[in-house]
Amino acid sequence: MSVVTEKRLKDRSGAVCEISGSDENLVVYLVAPKTEATPENCILITKSLKEQIENKDLMNPNDWRGLSDSMWNENLPVQIVSWRMLARLKNHDLLDMMYLDEEALEWAKATGEDEDEEGKIVHKDSNGNILLDGDSVVLIKDLDVKGATFTAKRGAAVHNIKLVWDNAEQIEGRVEGQHIVILTQYVKKTK
């Protein structure tokens, strides 16, 4: 994330988490499926809340008490994250009070937080491990790269992957300096 984006987010929020109001362990969170880290696509959030967004198993509903205030925030990315977490927590009373225009609602629903587990897109590696944006993976097979003049070799590390938000079988990453789409069946998550 750029230093300029972080500074603009701190100025916008008064250097506090835009969800909880805490001023400790703040990080920039890029709201999926956006890929450009601008203030219009990011929020300033505590590291703990960011980890809970990225891993449902860490969810602690008490940490999200600020949603009743953040849902009214004038900044759209804050509203989007608030909507998603209210949907995840199944707080329909607050969700029913929120208004998002059609385009914003489409952005909010892009990660499937409002869907039951069956309809949700989950990216898994060849061993069934769940993949998240920013993970590192290793190729388990030589892959011919379409439209390029090289083969991505087995064992090549791909760092800071991006999930293709509408296709559970694809991720994006850089191999030999080229940005490529990789099928998840050919990668293994590294710890």
Image (cartoon, rainbow, N blue to C red):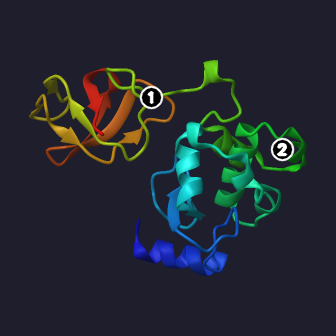
Q: CA distance from mark 1 to mark 2?
A: 27 Å
Q: Which of marks 2 and 1 precedes in the sequence?
A: 2
| Mark 2 residue crowding within 10 angstroms, few (<14) / some (14–19) / many (20+) | some
Task: Report the front residue among 57 and 38.
Answer: 57
Find numbered disc 2 in the image and state the secondary structure of the residue it sits on.
helix
Which amino acid is tagged 2? Leu
Which amino acid is tagged 1? His
Residue at left 63%, top 68%?
17
Quarter of the image for residue 67 reads: bottom right
- Residue 124, compared with residue 91, is above or below; it is above
Residue at left 29%, top 42%?
136
Residue 98's spot in the image, x, y percent?
A: 84, 50
Task: Report the front residue among 36 and 94.
Answer: 94
Q: Which residue lies under the disc numbered 1? A: 123
Residue 10's spot in the image, x, y percent?
A: 57, 77
- The answer to whether 6 appears left or right of 58 in the picture is left
- The answer to whether 63 appears left or right of 91 in the picture is left
Task: Report the front residue among 103 and 70.
Answer: 70
- Residue 121, compared with residue 22, is above or below; it is above
Residue at left 14%, top 44%?
176
- The answer to whether 177 appears left or right of 179 in the picture is left
Q: Which residue lies under the disc numbered 2? A: 95
